[in-house]
Image: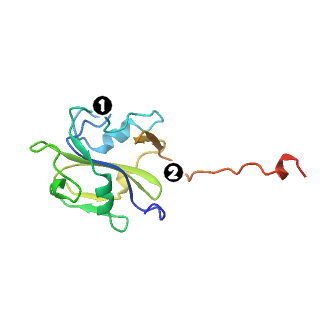
Amino acid sequence: EEDRRGLVILKSVYGRLPPLPGSTTPMATASARRRSSGGLATEPEFPGEEWGEERFILVTAPVQYLAEDSKLQLFNSSKAGLPGFCDPCPGEEKALYVLYRFKGLLHEVCVRDNSALTIPLMRDKLPEFATRIVNGQALVQSSSAPRFERPPSASSQGRT
């Protein structure tokens, strides 16, 4: 998927999630987060170790496994029964958060446990210069392809 710029799951977590930054309610939609984080300021990794009371599991690999032909569709039922998932907090409200790359652009979405999920969708695309942290590494949204400059050659430095 990475080589053909298809659907690549960068981070996915499932369970009782903390409120998204910029939101006052738990498991708010990712759109609230996008509105508050379009700038260059780096925010903490979501969710991170500081969310001690929240109970969730990392499901990045299982979600990537469920994707087929750069598409993922999960139906409106509990995600706890999916391969690689479990219920980290029985009896409590849960959500699934997914940060993904599609065609070289960052996207994110957060859905309640019993809601359907279909990705990729344009509405999930993060705004230009939005920053997300994954495993301590900052990912910055850019609509342009990265530019790599060649080191100056010997002939361009006046050598003959």
Residue at 27 percent of width and 33 percent of height: 51
- Tell us which disc is closer to us: 2 or 1: 1
Residue at numbered disc 1: 50
Residue at numbered disc 2: 143
Residue occupying the far bottom of the picture: 69
Q: Quadrant of the N terminus?
A: bottom left
**Circle 1 residues within 10 Å: few <14, some 14–19, many ≥20:** few
Q: Is residue 30 left or right of residue 89?
A: right
Residue at 37 percent of width and 37 percent of height: 45
Amino acid at pointer 2: Ser
Tag 2, which secondary structure? loop
Where does the image place residue 22, in percent across and percent down from the top left? 32, 33
Above/below status of 55 relative to 151: above
Q: CA distance from mark 2 to mark 1?
A: 31 Å
Q: Which mark is residue 125?
A: none
Of label 2 and label 1, which has the lower sequence position? Answer: 1
Where does the image place residue 35, in percent across and percent down from the top left? 37, 39
Where does the image place residue 142, in percent across and percent down from the top left? 51, 48
Of residues 3 and 76, the one nearer the viewer is 3
Amino acid at pointer 1: Glu
Of residues 49 and 97, the one nearer the viewer is 49
Where does the image place residue 96, in percent across and percent down from the top left? 24, 49
